Image (cartoon, rainbow, N blue to C red):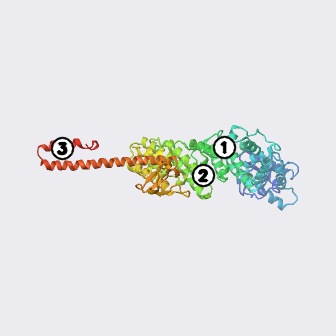
């Protein structure tokens, strides 16, 4: 067997090399058996002199440099530079050159030469570091095993920490509409600070592939980079790359990588508007369930920053239960409540009330939807705890619209929907409207009036620490002065000085409403009493006539004398 080998490097190019020349430097070549190639990544062909190197780091170009290093006896035939240091270090690892150098002390080591160059990486130019990042994506997983990837990211961090005046970015500063979208700032001061810390966005966004962006983001966080900066970079990366992606698979891979990286960030550093932008882009791409769940959880945690337009997501194609994706909004609410419970109750009440107002707006928007099922509407109206709403007027108006559109609802279905209303939190105006609203069940109107009556009684009897209500005996009542405004209660036995009352306008309006209802009840009692009297007279007239012919005239007279509503 001769010493000449045909080395096929990944099918790119075939090299004729002398095995005896490469063996002292390359452990993989030295360990080749007489029957062909062996070891990981080396596959023997039909002839013993042919070797196929699959997955060779750096490809044919890197192998040529390794062979030149060996043919020059490890001398000056190869210059290790910033442009080839990463590839040569990985190629040396692949060829097992470290083990060969340990056995023979005289030849120089390509591993040591590349390690020395990599140690100087923090002093490389920004362009060289960017090129090294690009190379590392093609050198995985060997770049991980040799620590080259960690060194590249370390050099990257040292550069991005430098102010833009001291750095030399290769492209224009990302102060564009796309950047402003990702930065999501609202003042010129914040924008200036954002720009000074993110000048590197464009250079790195162009270089990184979907498989690398999550790793780089994680490495930046591990080295103490601000979460807000990493978040803005990820949004900017998607803004730049997704629109230009060739296929749906490429877009999906980029979105998955960015979402996975964002899930490890502090929630306060992630833009709510940006998350809804990702949701809008990803909707037609069918993200994996775990990835979509992660996005929903992040949006839910920031739901108090959302707007009504954000929530108006069209229902998925083929859905007939509603025009908007109500199920998605319910998932947002569930994620918000879960996040609030996990973080503790401190400071959560204002956020909860903001979400409550947002849900009321959403209910008003979806209530006219004729395809929205009652069960879904009820679930949406009752999704938040009682503390989310101080006033239920908006909820009542949304339910009123829903009843007007869905005219075929049964009384039971309407009552189930009305269970979401706390009648004690209705204003007197809404309570009056509900009492006269024929679209609402009678039981709901009764409950509303009873609740408002309870509220008024608590106002009149509670007193409070200032003791606004002062009961006195009727004997001490005097005419004149403020006594003309007195309210006499308890059959004249107790006098409440209205001049001492500090009732709000709502309480006074409610009292007027209840007084009017009380008057109507009294009128109905009078009518019923008259009916009872007339019925007694009719019976007496029948007995007196004995059922004769005059009885018909008597009945007609009695009928004419009945109250109008009973005739």
List x then y, in percent, for residue 560. Answer: 22, 41
Q: Is residue 283 above or below residue 450?
A: above
Camera-side residue: 105 or 454? 454
List x then y, in percent, for residue 2. Answer: 78, 53
List x then y, in percent, for residue 456. Answer: 47, 52
Camera-side residue: 517 or 179? 517
Camera-side residue: 285 or 479? 479
* Residue drawn at the location 61% of the way across and 47% of the way down: 305
Apparent side of residue 114 relative to residue 539 in the rendered image (left or right)? right
Mark 3 vs mark 1: which is more N-terminal? 1
Check disc 2 and report the residue beneath it.
Answer: 350
Mark 1 vs mark 2: which is more N-terminal? 1
Residue contact between numbered discs 3 and 1, judged by CB atoms under 8 Å: no
Q: Residue furthest bottom?
A: 103
Where's the N terminus, which quadrant? Answer: bottom right
What is the number of the mark on residue 238?
1
Q: Secondary structure at mark 2?
A: helix
What is the number of the mark on residue 555?
3
* Residue drawn at the location 86% of the way across and 56% of the way down: 108
**Few, some or many residues within 10 Å of mark 3 (<14, 14–19, 20+):** some
**Few, some or many residues within 10 Å of mark 1 (<14, 14–19, 20+):** many
Q: Secondary structure at mark 3?
A: helix
Apparent side of residue 246 relative to residue 17 in the rendered image (left or right)? left
List x then y, in percent, for residue 371. Answer: 45, 42
Picture quarter containing residue 387? Answer: bottom right
- In this figure, what is the number of numbered marks? 3
Marks 2 and 3, how far apart in space?
A: 70 Å
């Amino acid at each position: 067997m001769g010493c000449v080998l045909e080395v096929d490097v990944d099918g790119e190019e075939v090299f004729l090399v002398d095995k005896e020349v490469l063996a002292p430097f390359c452990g993989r070549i030295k360990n080749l058996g007489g029957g062909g190639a062996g070891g990981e990544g080396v596959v023997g062909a039909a002839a013993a002199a042919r070797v196929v190197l699959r997955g060779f780091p750096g490809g044919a170009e890197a192998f040529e440099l390794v062979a030149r290093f060996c043919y020059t006896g490890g001398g000056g035939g190869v210059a290790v530079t910033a442009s080839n240091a990463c590839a040569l270090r990985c190629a040396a690892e692949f060829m097992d050159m470290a083990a060969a150098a340990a056995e023979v002390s005289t030849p120089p080591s390509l591993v040591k030469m590349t390690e020395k160059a990599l140690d100087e990486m923090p002093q490389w130019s920004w362009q060289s570091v960017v090129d090294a990042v690009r190379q590392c994506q093609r050198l995985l997983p060997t770049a991980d095993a040799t620590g080259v990837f960690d060194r590249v990211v370390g050099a990257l961090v040292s550069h991005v920490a430098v102010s833009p005046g001291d750095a030399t970015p290769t492209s224009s500063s990302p102060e564009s509409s796309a950047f402003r979208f990702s930065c999501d700032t609202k003042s010129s001061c914040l924008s200036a600070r954002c720009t000074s810390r993110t000048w590197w966005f464009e250079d790195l966004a162009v270089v990184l592939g979907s498989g690398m962006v999550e790793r780089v983001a994680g490495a930046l966080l591990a080295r103490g980079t601000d979460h807000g900066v990493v978040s803005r970079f990820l949004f900017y990366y998607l803004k730049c790359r997704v629109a230009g992606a060739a296929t749906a698979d490429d877009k999906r891979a980029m979105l998955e990588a960015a979402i996975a990286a964002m899930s490890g960030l502090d929630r306060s550093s992630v833009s709510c508007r940006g998350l809804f932008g990702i949701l809008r882009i990803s909707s037609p791409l069918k993200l994996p369930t775990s990835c979509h769940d992660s996005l929903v959880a992040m949006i839910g945690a920031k739901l108090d920053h959302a707007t009504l337009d954000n929530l108006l997501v069209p229902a998925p194609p083929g859905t007939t239960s509603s025009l908007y994706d109500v199920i998605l909004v319910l998932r947002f609410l569930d994620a918000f409540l879960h996040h609030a419970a996990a973080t503790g109750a401190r400071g959560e009440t204002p956020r909860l009330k903001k979400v409550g107002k947002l849900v009321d707006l959403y209910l008003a928007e979806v209530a006219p939807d004729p395809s929205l099922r009652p069960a879904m509407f009820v679930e949406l109206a009752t999704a938040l705890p009682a503390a989310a709403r101080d006033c239920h007027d908006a909820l009542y108006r949304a339910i009123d619209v829903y009843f007007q559109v869905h005219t075929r609802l049964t009384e039971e279905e309407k009552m189930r929907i009305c269970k979401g209303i706390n009648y004690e939190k209705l204003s007197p105006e809404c309570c009056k409207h509900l009492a006269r609203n024929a679209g609402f069940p009678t039981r709901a109107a009764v409950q509303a009036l009873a609740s408002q009556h309870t509220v008024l009684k608590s106002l009149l009897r509670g007193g409070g620490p200032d003791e606004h209500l002062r009961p006195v005996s009727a004997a001490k009542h005097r005419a004149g002065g403020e006594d003309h405004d007195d309210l006499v209660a308890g059959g004249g036995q107790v006098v409440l000085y209205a001049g001492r009352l500090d009732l709000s306008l709502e309480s006074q309006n409610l009292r007027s409403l209840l007084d009017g209802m009380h008057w109507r009840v009294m009128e109905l009692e009078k009518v019923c009493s008259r009916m009872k009297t007339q019925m007694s007279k009719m019976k007496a007239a029948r007995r007196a006539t004995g059922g004769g012919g005059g009885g018909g005239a008597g009945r007609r007279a009695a009928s004419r004398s009945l109250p109008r509503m009973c005739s």
